[in-house]
Image: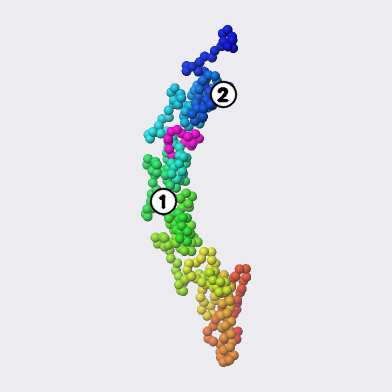
Amino acid sequence: LSQLPSPPTMSPTETGGLDVYYPDYDTTFGEAGCINTRPMPNGRPTYNTRISCCKNAYAGQTSGMCLSQLPSPPTMSPTESGGLSIYYPDYGTTWPLAGCINTRPLPSGRPTYSSQILCCKGAYAGQTSGTCLSQLPSPPTMSPTESGGLSIYYPDYGTSWPLAGCINTRPLPSGRPSYSSQIACCRGAYAGQTSGTCLSQLPSPPTMSPTEAGGLDVYYPDYATTWGEAGCINDRPLPSGRPITALKRAAAGERMEVSHLADACVRLLVSVILARAALNHSVRRRAALSPVPEQFVITTSICWRGSYRIRLQGIHMRGDK
């Protein structure tokens, strides 16, 4: 074409380049922009204006280099604090210490919110440190209880089970179950706590009325003693998951029912009955005396051990019976 008598020309733009713009792929993305330098590389996308080239080819450029090369670069109206008019989560800071910022430039792909508090609620809803909310111009407050803590209680998972209780210390850990009162928390989170620590921390701890012997009003098998020597006790506190029975002391001739006792209890019961029967029989044979006035009567006793049931019924010591 240059050998023609009148070679064709390409009319330059005002800046002396081409009348179209294309992305500068020879420069790193963060430092690149749109140019109209001659000659135009083969296969390069072109745009009628530089700003349309920047918006399409460098839409995700956080440095803003492309737009800054425009004759009249666009601006984003700042907020009162001098930043952007929108807020986004600060992913460059660790979660407990992070908050929402409006620092320029807006990182590519970062979620944005119209206000700082909406950003905190959306991006840092589970933040237990409260850092994001504390950075607000007027941080929200939670009304304390009479003891100065939260208005709710939650289990203290940071303390071992026997020594733990329910607390209302700030801040509320994320995902921790909460209760409207301390006693409701103890009943819900520490229902099987044998030490009674949680209930003992109440302003007015509940009490358990003792039996005549000073123990519980129920009996349970003593698993802490070897099986051959063990029996049933009512010592405080009642171990968690231990089977219990309501045992009534019966006078002579009254019925006494016992259920869910260990075999040691059964053997003790049988030993007592046989010993009394042997003593009564021996005395009557040797001295030809009438039966002893004291009577030891058990109408029915039912004992369980595993899947075996032992039933003692109709054992009497009255006269010759």
Q: Distance between the residues labelled 1 and 2?
A: 59 Å
Q: Give the range drawn in magenta.
A: 100-112
- The residue where tag 2 is placed is 44
Q: Which residue is drawn at 45% across and 70% down?
A: 210
Q: Position of residue 196 (x, y in %)?
A: 46, 63
Which numbered circle lies on residue 170? 1
Picture layout, residue 217 above or below residue 170: below
Other residues around mark 1 within 10 Å, as few (<14) / some (14–19) / many (≥20): some
In the picture provided, is 249 more to the left or to the right than 145? right
Classify mark 1: helix, strand or loop.
Answer: loop
Q: In which quadrant will I find the C terminus?
A: bottom right
Q: Residues within 10 Å of mark 2 (few under 14, many from 20)?
A: few
Residue 107, horizontal then vertical, whole percent: 48, 34
Q: Can residue 121 be seen in this view?
A: no
**Count of residue discs:** 2
Label 2 element class: loop
Please name the residue shown 59% across and 87% down the image: 281
The image quadrant where one finds the N terminus is top right
Quick check: marks 1 and 2 in contact, CB under 8 Å? Answer: no
In this rendered view, identify the residue nearer to me: 253 or 136. 136
Looking at the image, tell me whether mark 1 or mark 2 is earlier in sequence order: 2
Is residue 37 highlighted in magenta? no
Left or right: where 7 falls relative to 197: right
| Residue type of the residue flagged with mark 1 | Arg
Q: Which residue is drawn at 46% across and 34% down?
A: 106
Residue sitting at x 43%, y 23%: 72
Q: Does the magenta stretch include residue 105?
A: yes
Which of these two is toward me, 279 or 173? Answer: 173
Vertical position of residue 86 compared to residue 264: above or below:
above
Q: In front here: 75 or 319?
A: 75
* x and y percentages locating residue 35 in the rendered image: 50, 22
Residue kind at label 2, given as amino acid type: Arg
